[in-house]
Image (cartoon, grey):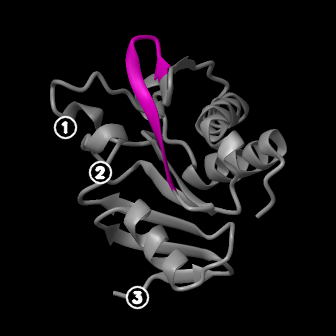
Amino acid sequence: MQPKKKGNTYFFLTLSSTQDKTWELASLGAPAGTLVISRTQTTGRGRQGRVWHSPVGGLWFSLLLFPVVPETVNQISLLAAQALASAIKKSAGLKTRLNLPNDLYYEDKKLAGIILEVKDEKAVLGVGLNVNCRTELFPLSIPAISLKDILNHRMSRGTILRSFLICFQHTTGISF
């Protein structure tokens, strides 16, 4: 099935991984700021090859960034986590906790994860946020929670995404 495309944003119903699709688009000459969003991922991943569960209801996306310089690479994940925490605060009124180096927690449960992959001067930033997921279906080994679990109502993934992109751009100065 063909993705929906608007500008440099690609929307998919299902992907194996938004990271993989973003790298594929980068290899085809996609511009900085290309955004890949999927309703679900079949083989989403976290840091160090860990599996990232990506069911319907979450916000799963990757953002192509370049050029990145080696001196700033380590800061990008941290700044992304701060931007995501700020976006959640603005859209849902919740304060989250950063679990270094790349996860956001609410109380003692994982709400979001961030992955950054770098090749040469390009980077793909991946974000997974449990928005309206049914976290009771997650493996028991994952202490996960979603915004819906916390707030007892559904949240707009689009609102959170827009807020994140604005916060991330403002925090990093990276334009896309």
Split into 4 quadrants, where in the image is the N terminus?
bottom left
Q: CA distance from mark 3 to mark 1?
A: 29 Å
Point out the tag, 3 or 1, that comes first from the N-terminus.
Answer: 3
Q: Which residues are magenta?
A: 105-118
Residue 149 x/y as whole percent: 40, 27
Residue in view at x 63 percent, y 36 percent: 84
How many numbered circles does the render carry? Answer: 3
For the point 50% across and 79% down, the residue is 27
The CA distance from mark 2 to mark 3 is: 20 Å
The residue where tag 3 is placed is 2
Q: What amino acid type should be assigned to the residue bearing mark 3?
A: Gln
**Three-letter amino acid code of the residue under disc 1:** Leu
Q: Is residue 68 left or right of residue 35?
A: right
Tag 2 near tag 1, CB within 8 Å? yes
Q: Which residue is mark 1?
A: 137
Assess whether residue 106 is covered by the magenta stretch.
yes
Instruction: Please state the horizontal and vertical placement of residue 11, each as a whole percent of the image.
Output: 49, 73
Q: Is residue 151 left or right of residue 15?
A: right
Q: What residue is shown with label 2? A: 55
Residue drawn at point x = 57 percent, y = 82 percent: 5
Q: Mark 1 or mark 2, which is nearer the start of the sequence?
A: 2
The three-letter code of the residue at mark 2 reads: Pro
Q: Secondary structure at mark 1?
A: helix
Task: Check residue 144 for magenta coloring.
Answer: no
